[in-house]
């Protein structure tokens, strides 16, 4: 049963043709497979960074799955997000050890520095901030992870330096 | 068959029966707030139906647990009673405590089950309940997710019964609630406003938007001439609001009640149902003779219209251009009736009583103002009319029988059966046959299109037309099946009747609650009884008031006035 008709509206496009090409290829690969929705969303989020309305509509149409069902799955699993992520994703650990050893100060300092709350992205979409519960290296507490880099025994005074490193990368990248 | 004992009673039921159903078969009513076997909905979500099964590790949810040979079940042990009360306590601990002023008060299953399981205090900590925004964006339905208990009945009704797939659970834990896709407001979504979600909701989380205040205000305004029309199904439903058995025909008492409420004229949507048959029947003949788009599909059901606009916009040319009887009535009340009685149409206020929530939406559609005024000013559901009659202290059952006012109150039996699935088709075929052959059908009862089968078919030899093939579908899930056939060219029908709600209007989103197929059947029976036993005329074209309407005002079917006042157009919408 075809439950989804074509949307008549063309959304403003924040994704590149390359990204759309990859997204459509993922959808096409899974089109006829049962139980494809979660793996498709996972892989698509890897391309697009997050799962806004326009992406959910594309997945719904492409897989022939009602939009409501796509949305239900996206909101059920905390791994999926409808909020954009920064080009650099900061995750502050507030597991037991980090909690005891000053993780909260790190979190508060980052909130002030970036002007955002956990779960949000700054207005340049450079940094996003999330809280995680234990990344499995309690001996190094307090820990924050930026992208793939783990920063150990973080001191609030040193946060400026850490952030500057990623800002500099951007400049080099764009320069 | 499987033999087991429930509360020491020997029970024998077919394999695959759930404990809950087995218990009900021997008169034990295990409470549940989620299961609805008629709709094949048993998610095991509410946990109120727990029972003790001997040697089972823990209590089990009887609505999903199948019976087994030799099983020993206790449905009324202390352990079961305490567990059920605790489940309800947990629900109430995260629920607004405004029962006395809730629209669902008295019809709320959560209230009823709380009473049944004997909750008298809430012992779990509950400092506050989760508050969600209220969605009152539409004219038809109001969603208050704070009252949602996540039974998921509305999700099943929307997806499996109606094929709309709009509603979904969102999030998890205390933040979990049911929303339209992407958490849009109903008015920004593909909602058809059929209201089947409100019919199955056990609490006040989805209800009709109450417009009784607007009607009271109009009735109290001496500058307004307030006329009322009632859909065919109302006369077979309203009694239930006052404790009469389902299937009681209360036409005359309803008329008296409306007059006592203060309406200046009591008219009948059945009058314009007869008119619809003349216009739509002629449209069908015109399409057949001129090679127009076939199959032609009925347009009476506003939930169905919204559905096809969203999901099959390419097929809109198949839909009859006739307005629904409700809208035809409004347009004529402010033109034909206004002229005939010398009343300023600006002062005429048209109220509809409908078994339907989508009619509220239909009346508010911007194109529904062909008289220069909004065709229909306010639409009330059967439940809202019941509320007004109760507020006025009127004892419906004790009322004398009243009669409809002229010139928009007379109707044929063909009109009254519009309220049941297949009724429009039967009424249309009676008149088309008579128009084409000059003779009446040998039997006016076309039983092939009656009853609750999801999709019904009939074929009839009609004079020069040859064999006319018809199909009837009710419930939008069945409509989807028929539309897929039309889209793929497999449907060789001439005429298709589609009603959005299961059972047709007798099962509409505005019907008295709680609903069941048995009630739908009994209400339809009352309408067929009105047709065969009460009405002397059984064909729309025989209605003298309709003949007078054409002689004095419209002149001819599909004529210029009809085109302007009685026909409409549709809008393709996105999903």
Image (tube, coloured by chain):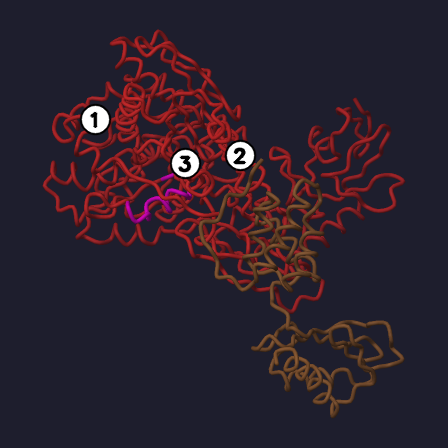
Report the mark closest to the observer, 2 or 3. Answer: 2
Q: Where, quadrant-wise, is the N terminus of chain B in this rendering? A: top right
- The span shown in magenta is B354-367
> First in sequence: mark 2 or mark 1?
2
Left or right: B199 with respect to A113? left
Q: The chain drawn brown is chain what? A: A
Left or right: B26 with respect to A57? right
User: Which residue occupies the foreground of this view, B210 or B364?
Assistant: B364
The picture quadrant where one finds residue B285 is top left
- Report crowding for label 1: few under 14, some 14 to 19, many 20 or more residues within 10 A (C-alpha): some
Q: Mark 2 to mark 1: distance in Å?
A: 33 Å
- Residue B355 versus residue B279 in the image, above or below: below
Residue marked by disc 1: B557
Residue B309 in percent (x, y) is at 41, 41
Helix, strand or loop at mark 1: loop
Q: Which mark is residue B477?
A: 2
Residue marked by disc 3: B238
- Residue A67 versus residue B511 in the image, above or below: below
Q: Mark 3 to mark 1: distance in Å?
A: 33 Å
The picture quadrant where one finds residue B396 is top left
Image colour for chain B is: red
State which chain disc 1 sits on: B
Badges 3 and 1, same chain: yes
Q: Mark 2 to mark 3: distance in Å?
A: 27 Å
Helix, strand or loop at mark 2: helix
Report the residue at 41% width, 43% height from top: B358
CB under 8 Å between callouts 2 and 3? no
CB under 8 Å between callouts 2 and 1? no
Does residue B365 show up magenta in the picture? yes
Helix, strand or loop at mark 3: helix
Q: Which mark is residue B88?
A: none
Taking the view exactly as shown, the residue that stands out farthest to the left is: B342
């Amino acid at each position: 049963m075809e439950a989804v008709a074509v949307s008549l509206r063309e959304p403003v496009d924040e994704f590149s043709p390359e990204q759309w090409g990859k997204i459509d290829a993922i959808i096409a690969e899974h089109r006829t497979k049962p139980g494809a929705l979660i793996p498709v969303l996972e892989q698509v989020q890897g391309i697009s960074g997050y799962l806004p309305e326009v992406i959910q509509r594309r997945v719904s149409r492409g897989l022939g799955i009602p939009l409501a069902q796509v949305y239900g799955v996206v909101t059920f699993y905390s791994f999926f997000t409808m909020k954009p992520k920064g080009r650099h994703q900061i995750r502050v650990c507030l597991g037991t050890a980090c909690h005891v050893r000053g993780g909260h100060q790190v979190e508060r300092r980052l909130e002030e520095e970036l002007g955002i709350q956990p779960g949000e992205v700054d207005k340049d979409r450079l940094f996003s901030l999330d809280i995680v519960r234990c990344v499995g290296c309690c001996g190094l507490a307090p820990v924050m992870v930026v992208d793939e880099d783990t920063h150990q025994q973080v001191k609030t005074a040193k946060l400026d330096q850490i952030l500057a490193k990623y800002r500099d990368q951007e400049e080099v990248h764009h320069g | 068959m499987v033999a087991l004992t429930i509360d020491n009673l020997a029970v024998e039921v077919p394999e695959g029966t759930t404990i809950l159903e087995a218990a009900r078969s021997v008169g034990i009513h295990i409470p549940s707030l989620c299961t609805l076997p008629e709709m094949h909905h048993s998610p095991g979500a509410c946990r109120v139906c727990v029972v003790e099964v001997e040697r089972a590790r823990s209590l089990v949810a009887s609505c999903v647990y199948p019976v087994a040979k030799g099983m020993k079940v206790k449905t009324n042990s202390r352990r079961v009673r305490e567990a059920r009360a605790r489940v309800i306590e947990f629900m109430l601990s995260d629920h607004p405590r405004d029962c006395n002023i809730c629209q669902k008060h008295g019809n709320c299953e959560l209230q009823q089950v709380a009473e049944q399981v004997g909750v008298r205090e809430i012992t779990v900590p509950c400092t506050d309940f989760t508050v969600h925004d209220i969605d009152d964006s539409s004219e038809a339905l109001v969603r208050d997710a704070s009252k949602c208990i996540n039974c998921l009945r509305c999700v099943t009704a929307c997806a499996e019964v109606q094929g709309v797939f709009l509603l979904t659970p969102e999030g998890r834990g205390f933040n979990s609630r049911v929303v339209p896709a992407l958490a849009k407001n109903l008015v920004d979504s593909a909602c058809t406003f059929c209201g089947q979600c409100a019919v199955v909701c056990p609490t006040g989380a989805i209800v009709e938007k109450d417009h009784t205040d607007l009607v009271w205000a109009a009735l109290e305004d001496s500058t307004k001439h307030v006329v009322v029309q009632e859909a065919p199904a109302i006369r077979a439903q309203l009694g239930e609001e006052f404790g009469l058995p389902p299937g009681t025909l209360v036409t005359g008492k309803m008329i008296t009640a409306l007059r006592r409420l203060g309406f200046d004229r009591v008219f009948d949507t059945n009058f314009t149902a007869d008119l619809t048959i003349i216009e739509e029947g002629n449209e069908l003949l015109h399409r057949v003779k001129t090679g127009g788009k076939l199959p032609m599909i009925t347009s009476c059901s506003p939930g169905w219209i919204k559905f096809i606009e969203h999901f099959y916009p390419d097929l809109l040319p198949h839909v009859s251009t006739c307005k629904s009887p409700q809208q035809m009535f409004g347009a004529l009340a402010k033109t034909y009736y206004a002229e005939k009685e010398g009343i300023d149409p600006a002062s005429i206020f048209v109220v509809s009583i409908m078994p339907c929530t989508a009619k509220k939406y239909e009346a508010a559609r911007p194109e529904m103002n062909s008289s220069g005024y909004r065709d229909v000013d306010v639409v009330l559901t059967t439940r809202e009319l019941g509320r007004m009659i109760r507020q006025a202290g009127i004892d419906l059952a004790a009322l004398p029988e009243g009669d409809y006012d002229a010139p928009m109150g007379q109707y044929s039996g063909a009109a009254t059966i519009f309220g049941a699935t297949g009724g429009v088709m039967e009424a249309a075929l009676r008149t088309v046959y008579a128009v084409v052959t000059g003779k009446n059908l040998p039997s006016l009862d076309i039983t092939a299109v009656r009853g609750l089968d999801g999709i019904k078919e009939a074929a009839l030899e009609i004079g020069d037309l040859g064999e006319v093939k018809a199909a009837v579908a009710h419930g939008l899930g069945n409509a989807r099946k028929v539309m897929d056939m039309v889209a793929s060219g497999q449907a060789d029908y001439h005429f298709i009747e589609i009603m959005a709600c299961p059972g047709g209007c007798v099962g509409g989103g505005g019907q008295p609650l709680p609903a069941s197929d048995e009630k739908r059947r009994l209400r339809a029976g009352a309408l067929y009884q009105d047709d065969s036993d009460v009405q002397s005329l059984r064909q729309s074209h025989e209605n003298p008031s309709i003949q007078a309407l054409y002689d004095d005002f419209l002149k001819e079917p599909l004529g210029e006035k009809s085109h302007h006042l009685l026909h409409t157009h549709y809008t393709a919408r996105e999903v």
